[in-house]
Image (cartoon, rainbow, N blue to C red):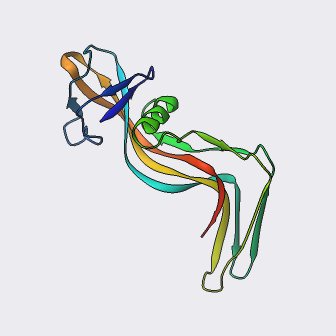
Amino acid sequence: MILVSASGALIVLGLPAAAGASQAGQLRGTAPQCGMGAVIYSVGSAQPKFVPDPDKIATGRSGVTLKIDVATGTTWTGTVGGSGSFDVSAIIASAQASIDASISYSRTTTTDMSGSWTVPSNQSWGWLALGAMGYTMDWYKYAQLDSCKYELEGSGVAQLPAHSPAFDHS
């Protein structure tokens, strides 16, 4: 298991990604240094997902042609949510180290883009969106206690883009 400390240092531990709840909130592992106060992040359960720009989604009924025009330099972000306080940069660094190095918090178009799609007759409604393929994943924040024990301090879900901007539809 690759974890990333809040300072960005990589730490390799033998910890299950989603332990904590199943182990009463405490984990045991071997880290290069043990001591109180260290914070580490891990990610798990990553699944490929189209991550849309929430401001660039068109919806319509069957038979309607949806169109989106995007100018060069349009930027949008993924989403990170969960319990407790957390460091988005540390979650992204953990995802880059253990899932895909191209994961980022945001993507920007490098050229003008245009997409259109007609909602087919076998759908009552549909959508067209600008976005990028990326991942949805669970994240976990652990605090290092004495004796190299780890306590789960927070967790949540992140949806982060990883590839070039593109269009997708329902």
User: Is residue 48 or residue 26 the one in the foreground?
Assistant: 48
Q: Is residue 127 above or below residue 53?
A: below
**Residue at the outermost bottom position:** 121
User: Looking at the picture, does residue 81 appear above or below residue 145?
Assistant: below
| Quadrant into which the C terminus falls | bottom right
Q: Position of residue 72 (x, y in %)?
A: 79, 46
The picture places residue 87, in percent across and down from the top left corner, at 48, 29
Residue 108 placement, left or right of 132: right
Number of numbered discs overlaid on the protein picture? 0
For the point 47% across and 32% down, the residue is 93
Whether residue 57 is situated above or below residue 148 in the rendered picture: below
- Residue in the image at 19% along x and 38% along y: 23
Q: Is residue 41 left or right of residue 69?
A: left
Residue 155 image offset from top left, x and y in percent: 38, 38
Residue found at x 26% / y 30%: 13
Q: Nearer the viewer, residue 151 or 129?
A: 129
How far across and how far down the image is residue 131, in percent? 64, 54
Q: State left or right for residue 28 relative to residue 41.
A: left
- Up-down relation of residue 29 to residue 73 (above or below): above
Give the position of the N terminus as an image quadrant: top left
In depth, the one of 36 and 161 nearer the eye is 161
Q: Residue at x 29, y 14 (%)?
A: 36
Residue 64 position by quadrant: bottom right
Q: Nearer the viewer, residue 85 or 29?
A: 29
Question: Left of 81 or right of it: where is 121?
Answer: right
